[in-house]
Each structure stands twice: as structure tokens, then as C-alpha cells.
Image (spheres, grey):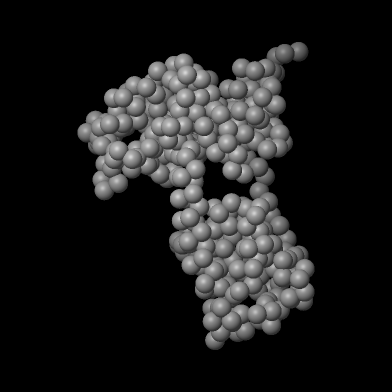
Amino acid sequence: MSYEYKDELDANNQLKIQNMLAELPVSVDRYITSTARTKSTRTTLTYVRMIRAFFLYMKTNHEAFEDLPLTRVTGEQLNCISLDDVDSFLAHLKAHQIDHPGKSNKNNTVEVYISALNAYFGFLYKREEIQKNPFQFVERHHEKVRRPYYLVGDENETFYQNILSGEGLSPKMLSSRERYHTAFRDYMICRILGMTGIRVSECVALDLDDINFKSRSFKVIRKGNKEAEIFFSDKVAEELIEYIEDIRPIYQPKEDEKALFLVAQGTHRGQRLSVRSVELLVKKYAAASGITYAGEFSAHSLRHSFAMESLKKTGGNLSLTQKLLGHEDISTTTIYAEATEEEIRNARNLF
């Protein structure tokens, strides 16, 4: 991943953050400034959006905010927010997404809102700018962590072969693949995700310059802005060379376009592929392949698949799997160490 690309992403996020902060109380700006050192611009953008959503709701539903521009909101108005007001907002949030009012939010999404707003109001309370934090005593409802979805057994091979063959795709999809030469590109994207365990954002950020065929590795920038060397197999190396030499030029990238994976059609042809595009293509092939839990399978599930295979082939070496995945805390990796349902069934005759 080039630092240039990451800097571009950060700059775009920062611009969106500043545009929203210009509409909000100055206290939000001060809170965001105080946390900028410890949070990524992506996380910060999420927090600002959620705080903004809360203030917009208050402006419509609380008399203390009705005739006042949000930029002029001070501790006087914030002290008027009660636990009932918070409960009302959370109930509304549960039933309506901010950008899609006709859809509901999952409990975990609501929990992120609570975390963001609790941190903001807690910041003001510690500085004695408000008399209370209305989110401090909100009852939390964390959903039980679900076990990850991943490729099972022979699916580790058949899934990738089905991408190449197009088995299960509609005639329209097959025609589009042939017309725009995307079959091998899609295959390589999924192969790299599933055979190295990198995140989707790390995959789309790969540049040609990040690849070192001599050491069979490429460079990525992981969470916390940490650079990591990720290794791939000789087979993947051969396939990468084939993709770079035979397929990538078909998309007509400009000379200065360094991205490994490119858009194949439309106005953005030849430009870097987006995270959303990769997420959609993985879901498409998962559904076509009829794999286990296809409806729940996502691009991140290929990272889960890599983790499960890693544990299986290293005799359950959690420490090594943690390093391969780039987890800061090994407790994050332990979810993969739980026995699968199949293993539990097979253990019934052990004794």
C-alpha cells in the first residue's frame, strides 16, 4: 500500500470531517482534536457522523434546540438533555437508519452510537463544561459475538475454481465477465484475500511497487499505520505475474496508475478498485458457488478462512496466526480456536 494512497484517503476523510464540524458546536471540534492522536481518520469520521446525527435529532425533538443553530449550542442546552431524551433517540435509531430511514439498525450499530456519544459527553463532563453525562448510565445491550463464517473443507478449492469457471452465474453475468475480462482479476483478488489473510482495504490499496517477487511478499500498511511484509506462495506468485502481464493492461490504466487491481469498465475504468466493489464481487461468487452460509459470507470471510486454515495447518498455533493476521491482541485471534460444529459432531465417538 503506497503512503500516497493512504494520505489521499486520510485527506478525503479529513475534508468530510471538517465540513461536518463546521455545522456543529465548537465543543465537538475540541473533542475531535483531543482524540485525533489515537484514532484513525476513518474512525473519527464515523464518530463525527454519529454525534451530528444526535444533534440533528435534538434540534427536531427538543425544545432547547429548536430555534438555535447547532454552532451556537453550549453547555446550557446540553445540560437540558435527560436520560429520557437519550432513550428516545436510541429507540428512533434502532428503528431508522440515518441515511436509510426505512431500514432499522442492528444492536451493535446502536452500541457504537452510544460509545461515540458517551465519549463526547464524558470529555465535556471531565472538563466541567456540563453538569452531567446523559449517556453515562445508558443500559448496554451487546450482542453475543458470532463465530466467523469461513470456507469449509473442499470449499477452499472449489470456491476459487468456480470463480474461474463462472459456475452458478447467470448468463448475463457470464457475458459481462467475458466482455470485460474480469474473471481472472476477480479470481486473483479472492486468492490474495484467502491465501494471505489481508483485509479488503489492504488488498485494494496494493500497488505494483508493493510486490516483491524475489521474496514472494508484498508490503501493506496495517492498522495503527504499521508497515508489514506479507508473504505469498510460489503458485500465487505465478498467477500474479499472469494477471499483471496479461489482464491488467486490458483495463487501460494511465502510466502513473500504480494500483494492482483496477476497475474494468465505465467512467472509472483503469482506476483503483474500491472496497465496496470487492465486497460485492465476493458476495456474488459466494452465492453462485452455493458454499456453506453463502448468505452470510463476505469478503472478510476469506480472512476468516485463512485464519482457520492457518490454525489447522500449524497445529493450532495461535501466536503464529495472530502475527499472520496482524492482530494487536491475541484475544482477537482466539475466536478462531473454538471448535467447529463439525469437529464437535465428529468427537462424539472418541470415547
Task: Identify which residue, 189 or 343, lies in the foreground.
Answer: 189
**Is 218 left, or right, of 177 in this rendering?**
right
Q: Quadrant of the C terminus?
A: top right
Residue 57: x and y in percent read 56, 73
Q: Is residue 325 visible?
A: yes
Residue 244: x and y in percent read 34, 27
Question: From what the image shows, is residue 224 above or below residue 317?
Answer: below
The image quadrant of residue 259 is top left
Question: From what the image shows, is residue 109 above or below residue 286?
Answer: below
Question: From what the image shows, is residue 229 above or below residue 93?
Answer: above
Question: From what the image shows, is residue 233 above or below residue 17?
Answer: above
Residue 340: x and y in percent read 63, 26
How many marks the image carries: the answer is 0
The image quadrant of residue 128 is bottom right
The image quadrant of residue 271 is top left
Q: Residue at x 60, y 68 (%)?
A: 29
Q: Residue at x 48, y 38 (%)?
A: 1
**Is 236 left, or right, of 79 in this rendering?**
left
Residue 23: x and y in percent read 52, 73
